[in-house]
Image (cartoon, rainbow, N blue to C red):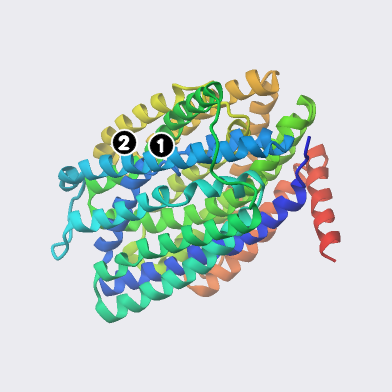
Amino acid sequence: MQRLERTKNSIRNLMFGIVNKCISIFLPFLIRVIIINVLGKEYLGLNNLFTSILQVLNLAELGIGSAMVYSMYKPIAEGDGELICALLALYKKLYRIIGLIVFAIGFALIPFLSYLIKGGVNDIDYNVLYLIFLVDTVLSYLLFAYKNSLLIAHQRTDVGSNIGTIIHLLLNFLQVIFLFIFKNYYAYIIVKPVFTIANNLFVNIATKRMYPQYKPCGIVSKEKQREILSRVKALVGHKVGTTVVASADSLVISSFLGLGILAIYSNYYYIIYFIVSLTSIFFNGMLAGIGNSLVVETNDKNYSLFENINFILSWLVSWCSTCLLCLLQPFMELWMGKDMLLSTSSLICMVIYYYSWQFRTTGLYFKDAAGMWQADFWKPYVSAFFNIVMNIVLVQIIGINGVFISTIVCMFGINFFWETIVLFRILFMRSPTKYICKELLNLLKTIVMCTVTYFMCLALPMQYGFSCIIFRILICIIFPNIIFIMSSFKTREFSFAVGKVKQIIQKRL
């Protein structure tokens, strides 16, 4: 069997992914400031609302691609080019069917948009704006989205990252010019579909040059089609439920609290999503490597890999949680001003929200790489149902904090335990007790790191402004990491992490 160069590919994907993600995050970061100053915060809230609606419909985000990529791991490992070509043909057909379905459902939602908007904008047609967002979402499915599966399955997401970097630079540059010249939101958003088309065309050209032997032709056997479609059905349910949990917050805030509050919330969420995106680059770059490992390695080696990756993730998530608690509020005041701040209690809720979202990531990626979406088929539906009900009830009682609390309860109380039991029972075939105890210990470490670092930051003579942020950054770099290292340096996983860092440094020198 073919063993992918997992470490080399993961590092390359990580480096290019970070560069692309920084550009795709920092430039829109600047644009958000311009939109608020030129057009008003309600436009920012409107942008977030439509994005949340279409996230529910966007089946690339919902993980259809994950099911398709999973089906490629084995033929790539075995060098079965004929099956890969047949899979591409099937994926092309499925993606275009999906694109038409997304457009039809999205179009049918137009009459209900007014119910989701409180405190709207008078000088804009919501229906026209929503249609532009919808067309932009659908275009990738109708063009070459299926070609991305080749890059992901071969651990060459760096290629897509490089193309995305250039496209984002050009798009954001043009959007800034249009905002200043026309001071019109239509002019700002209309260019987005054009660059989506360009991105698809360049990905298509790149995959043709890199993998000329793979063309969408041939027929997948009926048995294989049933296997793939069964997996897709389970994964759609999974990712729909997951996305509903993530998107319901914005929809409920817009409906009950208004576009102005949604705009403030979206600024905080934007920073948190940036942190999540950087973490996801680390895992997306390794996803094919995990899939390849599950095919060619023993169960014990795969579990050891899981523990090592989870240790690194726990360190990252604990440190990022500490940084968010200590840096987010002064940064938001410097960026947006005092009028665009949430309360301290809301900040704490958002940090817990981030932690509850991210600490489960290792298990989710192993579950995706193993194609285990049918094992906990009902979990996303149960989680989404309780999340929506609690959102609607609690937002009317305690405001925006009720939205955060309902999502946190679902992620901790339903998702984590359900996912863990399934993962350990089916994939690792061992008791999850040791893992759950480790996660509780990691949670305790995070609480200590956050508490100690937060009160050290409060002791600074300056509490806001640029100098405050610089001193807080230094504190956040040093002290939480010292706490984590002191509590972990004797573990096998810590030795693995240090060894990997040394290996990377030696290769670079």
Residue 479: image location, x then y, percent: 68, 56
Which numbered marker is on residue 407? Answer: 1
Q: State the residue position of label 2.
A: 391
Q: Quadrant of residue 227?
A: top right
Q: Residue at x 22, y 52 (%)?
A: 258
Quadrant of the rendering where the N terminus is positioned: top right
Say above or below: 255 vs 507: above
- In the image, 224 versus 192, the foreground residue is 224
Say above or below: 139 vs 461: above
- In the image, 57 versus 465, the foreground residue is 57
First in sequence: mark 1 or mark 2?
A: 2
- Disc 1 and disc 2: Cα gap in Å? 8 Å
Quadrant of the rendering where the C terminus is positioned: bottom right
Q: Residue at x 83, y 40 (%)?
A: 490
Tell me which amino acid carries mark 1: Thr
Q: Are marks 1 and 2 in contact (CB under 8 Å)?
A: yes
Question: Which SS class for mark 1?
Answer: helix
